[in-house]
Amino acid sequence: MPASVASNDAVYAKIGRRLLPLLLLCYIVAFLDRVNVGFAKLQMTTAMGWSDAVYGFGAGIFFIGYFLFEVPSNVLLERVGARRWIARIMITWALVSGAFAYVDVIPWGPLPGWFGLENTVLGFYALRLLLGMAEAGFFPGIVLYLTYWYPSERRARTYARFMTAIAVANVVGAPLSGWIMEAFDGAGGWSGWRWLFVIESVPSLVLGLVVWRMLPDGPSKASWLTRDEAALVEQQLETERVAAQNSKADGSKGAPSSVRAAFTNASVWWLALVYFASAVSLYGVNFWMPTIIQELGVARDAYLQIGLLTMIPWGIAGVGMLWWGAHSDRTGERRWHVSGALTLTAAGLLLLALVSGQTVASLVALSVVATGVLSAMSTFWSVPTEFLRGTAAAAGIAWINSIGNLGGHFGPDLIGRVRTSTGSASVALLALAALALVGAIVAAAVVRPRTNQSQRPA
């Protein structure tokens, strides 16, 4: 291996050791606070008297708040710095997440009457909406933040490593959530689901304070990089930016670099559709997976067992997405990695709809869905970060993520409504499979082959 390549690898390995463990932990607790409602549902809906439709809508309304605040949050991150803004996001979502323990006692004044809802239902919807507002900007902020450190040819594997947090959050969080609900049920006169929200909000609060103290805003602010190492990273990123801006010389369009350019770029909108298809599948299955597994014949109050079974699909998915992202970087190919993973997701959803109630087949189907969708999402983020620059990157990444994550509202809501009206989720799963296939087709048509594959790291 040439000395220069070895030197580059050593610097980026050092950055990875310093940044990724903290960012991974932050995303683990973020995702845990976002989806632990799936476990709380096993007790909470019965205690509150809610239907599957109420739960599905409430679980998904998180993404409406996310959508409303995503772009301004990411633009503010670019202006005030990642350290301050990510810390702010984490501390506020921790406080809102813990407030779910009091969903039935928080006074909402005349609002329930205005909306024609019971106080508990209004409280559930309002807190989920507020949680989305609080967390808005976190994930796209990290995606943007990593572009301050890694050139494009290293991003797919980096995003895959970062997004293993989704798998880890479920592998660790599923049995943890089940154990909390069993072990603390009745303690202090509280049900297990209330303890679940309070206990799992604490790590987010602590890590928010850690981020405030420890996260550097960029290579030049990192005390653990030498001047030469920071200069090497910034020089490579600047070379990449200049090359993108000079791409007009070969007849192609230059990289969008303003907010307006991002919103008027057709590729941004098409990529948002691809990400929408991914998010529908991810959250549709994620928010309902504990219930799906419970209905395979597990006792209703065997929460730890449900958690242990939920680990299986996410554990397989974590390994699969790491291999997928590394293979995409090694080959320099993005289009078919995104499209192929979404096709795999569609196949898993189709299988899940056809084998309803069969334990082994359902777990295989869930594993295929989880592997496909996480592989698609992790590889996907290397695409927009290759052609968006500057403020356009902040706005464009946030816009793709916010539009795409509206799928996180429609997926769980669709399953909840179909289950309430038919008693089965099969029709909804078929609809999700069709949408995943549409996303695969759009990705194959829109994602352009890379033209700088010669720059791939050895």
Image: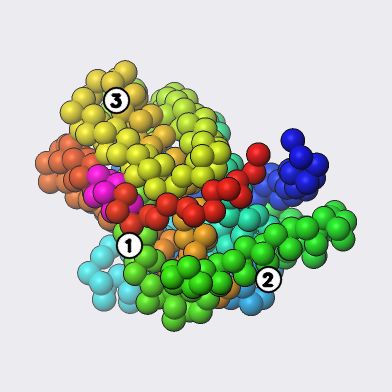
Secondary structure category for the residue under label 3: helix
Above/below status of 7 relative to 305: below
Residue 210: image x %, image y %? 74, 56
- Judge depth for marks 2 and 3 and give the one in front: 2
From the top left corner, tell me how far across and down residue 240 is, in percent.
Answer: 62, 63
Residue 126 shown left or right of residue 423 in the figure: right
> Split into 4 quadrants, where in the image is the C terminus?
top right
Closest to the observer: 329 or 173? 329
- Using a 10 Å C-alpha cutoff, classify the residue at mark 2 as few (fewer than 14 neighbours), some (14 to 19) or many (20 or more): some
| Disc 3 target residue | 362
Secondary structure beneath label 2: loop
Residue at 74 percent of width and 63 percent of height: 235
Q: Earlier in the sequence, mark 3 or mark 1?
A: 1
Check disc 3 and give the amino acid type: Ser
225 left or right, relative to 254 = right
Q: Residue at x 43, y 70 (%)?
A: 251
Give the residues drawn in magenta, as a range: 436-443
Q: Amino acid at mark 2?
A: Gly
- Locate the N terminus by quadrant: top right
Tag shown at residue 270: 1
Q: Is residue 90 magenta?
A: no
Predominant SS of the magenta segment: helix
Amino acid carrying mark 1 in the image: Trp
Cα gap from disc 2 to disc 3, whole angstroms: 44 Å
Q: Which mark is residue 81?
A: 2
Q: Is residue 171 above or below residue 96?
A: above
Q: Residue 97: x, y in percent? A: 52, 56
Judged from the image, the secondary structure of the residue bearing numbered disc 1 is: helix
Tell me which corner region of the image, top left, top right, bottom left or bottom right, holds residue 286. Answer: top left
